[in-house]
Amino acid sequence: IDTACSSSLMALENAYKAIRNGQCSAAVVGGVNLLLKPHTSVQFMKLGMLSPDGASKAFDASGNGYCRSEAVVVVLLTKKSMAKRIYATIVNAGSNTDGFKEQGVTFPSGDMQRQLVSSLHRECGIKPGDIEYVETHGTGTKVGDPQEVNGIADVFCQCEREP
């Protein structure tokens, strides 16, 4: 599955849904990023997406882009009844797209992110106020981070909760 920066998440979503729908009882999900072609990094730098000082500073006023790196990550998903150990439980997974935007492909939509998170919570019956941790995209860019953090705040910060 190749959907740019969401490829591993899309693979995880597909595996989760295949297990949930009874198509399989377990799945190995892997994600790989290898920096084989300098041209790709040059293009990201020209788009203003990469940090010129080599440091990702997500959600920081001094954020000026992210750093690319290599990684190989693999997880085994299975039904709880088959698990020997449980490190985490997936209660729902989903994706959406914000389609064509005048601002361009590098400009995310906080509204679409909010809509997705809200719909996933409704589907699985978990209240946003019950969530204690949110994993983010966190690009460290001037356009991406505000969209993402405002989408998160719109969903998770609208209820009373203990600090």
Image (cartoon, grey):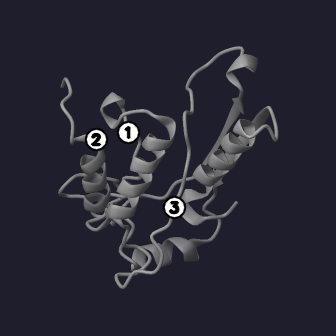
Q: Residues within 10 Å of mark 1 (few under 14, many from 20)?
A: few
In the rendered image, which quarter is residue 35 located in?
Answer: bottom right
Element at badge 1? loop
- Give the amino acid at mark 1: Val
Question: Between marks 3 and 1, how big is the CA–CA gap?
Answer: 18 Å
Q: Residue at x 68, y 44 (%)?
A: 17
Q: Residue furthest bottom?
A: 102
In the rendered image, which quarter is residue 142 located in?
Answer: bottom left
Which disc number belongs to residue 134?
Answer: 1
Q: Residue at x 28, y 68 (%)?
A: 143
Q: Residue 77, percent across and down?
A: 69, 32
Q: Is residue 130 visible?
A: yes
Q: Is residue 57 visible?
A: no
- The residue where tag 3 is placed is 96
Q: Residues within 10 Å of mark 2 (few under 14, many from 20)?
A: many
Instruction: Identify whether 163 is placed above or below 1.
Output: above
- Give the amino acid at mark 3: Asn
User: Do the residues under discs 2 and 1 have CB atoms within 8 angstroms?
Assistant: yes
Q: Residue 139, percent across and down?
A: 37, 58
The mark nearer the N terminus, 2 or 1, is 1
Element at badge 2? helix
- The residue where tag 2 is placed is 156
Q: Residue 21, percent across and down?
A: 74, 40
Element at badge 3? loop
